[in-house]
Amino acid sequence: MRKFSCSNSVFWVVASALFITIFANYTMFTKANSWLLSSGTNQMYMVVLGLYQFLLLLFLMALLTMHKWYKHVLVIFYLLAAISAYFADSYGVIIDKDMLINAAETNIAEAAGLLSWRVLIYIAALFVFPVFVLYKVEITPQTVGKRIFHHLSAALLAVASIAVIFLATSAFSASFFREQKQIRVYSSPLSALYATYQIANRTIFSPSQSFTRIGDDAVTSPPSDYPELVILVVGETARADRFALNGYRKNTNPLLSKENVVSFTNASACGTSTAISVPCMFSIDGKDKFDLSKFKSKENVLDLAAKMGVSILWRDNNSSAKGVADRLPYEDFSTPKNNPVCDPECRDIGMLKGLDEYINKQKKGDILIVLHQMGSHGPSYHERVPENFQKFKPFCKTNQLDKCTNEEISNAYDNTILYTDYFLSEVIKFLKKYDNRFETSMFYISDHGESLGEYGMYLHGMPYSMAPKGVTNVPMILWFGKELIKTHNLDMDLLKRQRDKAISHDEVVHSLLGMLEVQTEIYKKDKDLHFWATKK
Ligand SMILES: [Zn+2]
C-alpha cells in the first residue's frame, strides 16, 4: 500500500472510535431502542446516545494514544470491543469486573467450550480486519509536539461536546445515566475498560489495609432497669424543604405534626449519593476526613456500640447497608421472603413486622435498630407509595422525567414524603408501646436529598460543589419517649429553639453515643443533639 496522505494519528483515533461505536455496539443500541419505544420517548434520542458512546470513546482513545506506540493501544481497544460485542450479542453477557475475574480463573477446557464459528467471525470482522488495515497503511511520521497537540485537542473537543449535549438534553440524559444502567453496561468496549481499570486499581494500587479498631477506651454504664431502645431510620432521597414540619406549603406531615418531634431545618448531608452518605454518617471520621476506600477496614459507630453490649439489628429495604453492617446482624427487607408488605414493591412499613419478637428475644440491655428505607428513591417516585398515598395530583407516572411537568414530578415526589411521614409516625407508635420498659427514641435522617429540576438537574449523585441545596439539605427528626425525657432530664422546647442551627451527618455518631451513654474520647458533646436537649 502507498503512503497514506493523512499523516495525523488522530485520524486513526477518530476512525477507530467511529468504527467501534457503529459495529461493536449492536446490543446496546437495540436495548436503547426498545427502551425508547416502550417508554414513548422520541427515537431521535438514539442519536444522542450514539454521540455519547462515540465521544467518550474518542476522549479515552485520544488520551491513551499520544505516544508513538499508539497503534498497539488501538489494537487493545479493537480486541476488547470484539470480545465485548461477541458476548453481548450472543449471550447478553457484560464484560464487567466479576466477569473478568471469572475469565482469569477459567481453564482451557471451559474456554474451548465457548469457541464457535460465530466468535471467529466477530474476531475477524472487529479485530483482525481493522488491525490489518492499521498496520498495512504506512503513516508519515509526525513530530511529538504535533501529535500531543492534536490528541489533546481531540480529547478536549470530545469533553466539551459531551458537556454541551448533556446540558441541551439534561432531563433525558439525567434519567438515562441514572436509571438505564442495564443499557449503559453494554457499552463496548467502555465497560470492559472500566472493569480492567477497577481490577488494576484494586490489585496494584491499593495495598491490603490492616483493620482498625476504634474506641478501645470506651466504657458504658451497667445495664439499668430502663435500657435504651433506639430506632434509627436512615431515609432515602428525602429533601428537608419538602417536609411541612420545616415550613413546606403542602401538608406532607399530617401525622408527624401531631407528635412531639423536633425537626432540624438546616442539616447537611455528607455526600450526594447513598454509597457515600450512608457509610459516612456512621464513620467517626466525619464529613471532612471521610474516605470511602478506608471505610470497610475500620470499625464504625455501630461496631463500637456492639462492643459495648448493645444489641444491634440492621433491617434494609434499600439496596444494602453499604458496608456499615458487615459485622452486624442484617436482614434484607426488599424481598417478599422477609417483608410481608410487598405489592409487588416491598414497603418500608414492612420493616416493623416481627420487631416485637426481636425485642422480646434480646437479653437485658440496650437495643439499637436501624431501618434503612426505600423512601423517595427516584426517578420512579410514583412506584414508591401505595395507591392510597397518591394524594397530591396530578403526579408523574413514569421514570421518564422529561415527559412530566414540574408540578407532576413535584406531586409524585411529595407523595413519597407523605408516605415517609406515615412510616415515621408508625415507628413512634411502635416505640410508645415500650415506653414503660425502655428509654425509647427515634432518630430519622435522610442520606441525601434530590434535585427536582433546579438548574435543569434531576436526581442526585452529582459532585457536592455542583449539587443544588435540595440534594445536600436533608431532613433530620428526633423523637424521645417519656422515660428517656424523665431520666435524661430532657426539654423538648429547649431543643426546638435550636432547630435552625447548622448541623450535618456528623451529629449522628455523637448523638448515638450520647443516647447510648457510651463514654469515649471519640464522643463530642457539642455534636450530640440529645445533649442539646439536656436541661442545664
Ligand atoms: Zn440514597
Image (tube, rainbow, N blue to C red):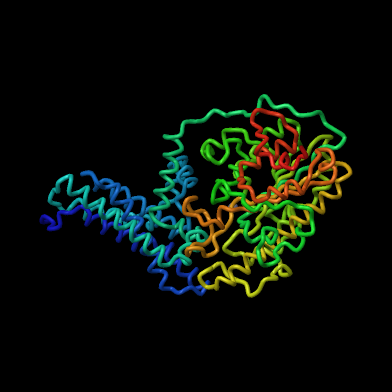
**Is 336 on the left-hand or right-hand side of 320?**
right
**Image location of residue 484, percent across then percent down:** 82, 42
Q: Position of residue 464 (x, y in %)?
A: 50, 50
Q: Is residue 332 visible?
A: no
Q: Please name whichever residue, 329 or 90, is drawn nearer the observer in this view of the structure.
A: 329
Q: Please determine whether, in this image, residue 79 is positioned above or below residue 212.
A: below
* The quadrant where residue 522 appears: top right
Q: Is residue 461 above or below residue 517?
A: below
Front residue of 85/6: it is 6
Q: Is residue 532 left or right of residue 157?
A: right
| 230 up-or-down from 150: above or below | above
Residue furthest out toward the top: 217
Task: Please state the horizontal and vertical placement of residue 190, each as a whole percent of the image.
Answer: 39, 53
Figure quadrant of residue 410: bottom right
The vertical placement of 457 against 284, above or below, is below
User: Which quadrant does the C terminus fall into?
Assistant: top right
* Left or right side of 163 for 463: right
Residue 453 can be seen, yes or no = yes
- Residue 412 location, x and y as percent? 63, 68
> Which residue is at a point 70% across and 27% down the rendered structure image?
218
